[in-house]
Amino acid sequence: MKKQTESTEKQNSLTPFDYTLTVIGSKWKMKIMYQLIQQEVIRYGELKRRIPNITHKVLSSQLKELEESNIVNRKEYRQTPPKVEYSLTSRGRTLMPILEAMCKWGMHNLPSHLSIEPAENSSYGTR
């Protein structure tokens, strides 16, 4: 019980910057959000194909965290086989300028010995 209280106290004392990092602060969450902005709605399997190095366990947990933060909407269809679609919520779309700014910063500051991977259908990095 004491551990849970300490955790709750830490969450209640977060700065706005800290809070933002808790919501988007992993490479996977940002990559998931990037894919969701590219496709209005995307199914789990397609999302997994578009982020090839992510494991199913990590993808599932990151999607769940994003859903709990009201960044991602999960729509489940009761059918066989099961069908689940993901999309960004309006709150999630408000984070896109932050991700775009990060991408622009990376393009301008990427060391010359590194190459930029082309992104499919991306507006990021082309502006």
Image (cartoon, grey):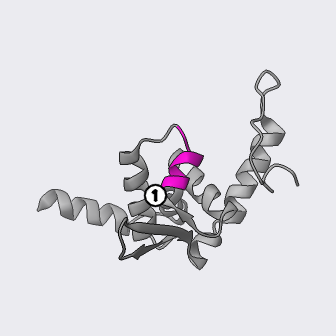
Q: Is residue 53 visible?
A: yes
Quick check: 7 above or below 73? above
Q: Position of residue 36 (x, y in %)?
A: 61, 62
Residue 50 part of the magenta-drawn span? yes
Residue at figure coordinates x 72%, y 64% from the top left: 97
Quick check: 87 above or below 47? below
Q: Is residue 25 visible?
A: no
Residue 66 part of the magenta-drawn span? no
Label 1, on which residue? 22
Q: Position of residue 71 (x, y in %)?
A: 51, 70
Residue at figure coordinates x 64%, y 56% from the top left: 34
Residue 105 vs residue 85: left or right? Answer: right
Q: Position of residue 49 (x, y in %)?
A: 55, 46
Residue 75 vs residue 95: left or right? Answer: left
* Quadrant for the C terminus in the image: bottom right
Q: Main secondary structure of the magenta part?
A: helix
Residue at figure coordinates x 81%, y 49% from the top left: 125
Q: What's the magenta region?
A: 45-52
Q: Nearer the viewer, residue 109 or 87?
A: 87
Q: Nearer the viewer, residue 104 or 6?
A: 104
